[in-house]
Amino acid sequence: MWPRILPFVLYMGFIVLESILQSASTWLPPLAARGALLPLWLYPVKTVVVLGAIVVCWRYYDELHERLWVSAAEAALAIGAGVLVYLAWVRMDWPWATMGTVSGYNPWQAGTAFGGVLAAIRLFGASIVVPVMEELFWRSFLVRFVITLYPEKVPGVTAEFTSVRLGTFTWISFIATVLLFGSEHALWLAGIMAGVVYNLLLYTTRRLWPCVIAHGVTNLLLGIHVLWTQEWQWW
């Protein structure tokens, strides 16, 4: 259980830390002068820490010890799903579908000397590290864990979430994970939409790699979109 939870907990912990530091910057002069730059420099640290946790726990991820794709059709389906989510995401920034203020991540605030490096790290973290971390938590662990809470719904299920076959569908696990996945994002409706697509991909393929690939394609295209248009709010 913990190998799939730990990277996600570490990632969320850095988000909490960033929020605390930004709040503290309002009354701590040394932090106030660097308040806008804190998220820029915390992201590389967060990426390294989360990636390190994934590498250390890699031997436990049986679902990722398989091939990236088993057929050209599966690869096309995963890539197509990722493109679809990206195209929908950048059109779902309606005010009523956004939680709080979306400030975005502009690496060039750190200056031209470091902007390119931070942009590359952000792109790597968003398109490689985050998809692996989130899909391990949401689609591999949580979907199956929720099913174990109602074992009578699926024959043969025990209290151990790995007793649930990857890609097993129940309405309650589907709805719960999709809504929680959406609540994790400032653009909550776009997050719900993405959660639905990635869950459907899981149910269709019964494998995790297609979900990781789709998620990675979405985030890669979104990152390219941000760097090209400088619409930093998507980051």
Image (spheres, rainbow, N blue to C red):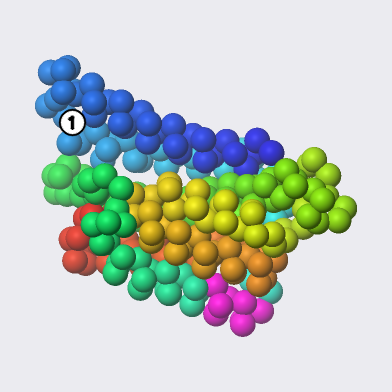
Residue drawn 49% across the image and 77% down it: 80
Indicate the amino acid at tag 1.
Gly
Which of the two residues, 133 or 96, is positioned nearer the viewer here? Answer: 96
Q: Is 228 placed left or right of 147 in the picture?
A: left
Q: Which residues make up the magenta segment?
A: 71-78
Which quadrant would residue 226 be assigned to in this image? bottom left
Q: Is residue 86 above or below residue 104?
A: below
Q: Measuring from the top left, give residue 152's x and y in whole percent.
A: 82, 51
Q: Is residue 36 above or below residue 32?
A: below
Q: Measuring from the top left, give residue 13's x and y in whole percent.
A: 44, 32
Name the magenta segment's main secondary structure.
helix
Q: Is 88 placed left or right of 53 in the picture?
A: left
Q: Is residue 34 above or below residue 109?
A: above
Which of the two residues, 111 or 64, is positioned nearer the viewer here? Answer: 64
Dot 1: element: helix
Residue drawn 23% across the image and 46% down it: 101
Q: Is residue 56 above or below residue 206?
A: above
- The residue that mark 1 highlights is 35
Residue drawn 69% across the image and 39% down it: 1
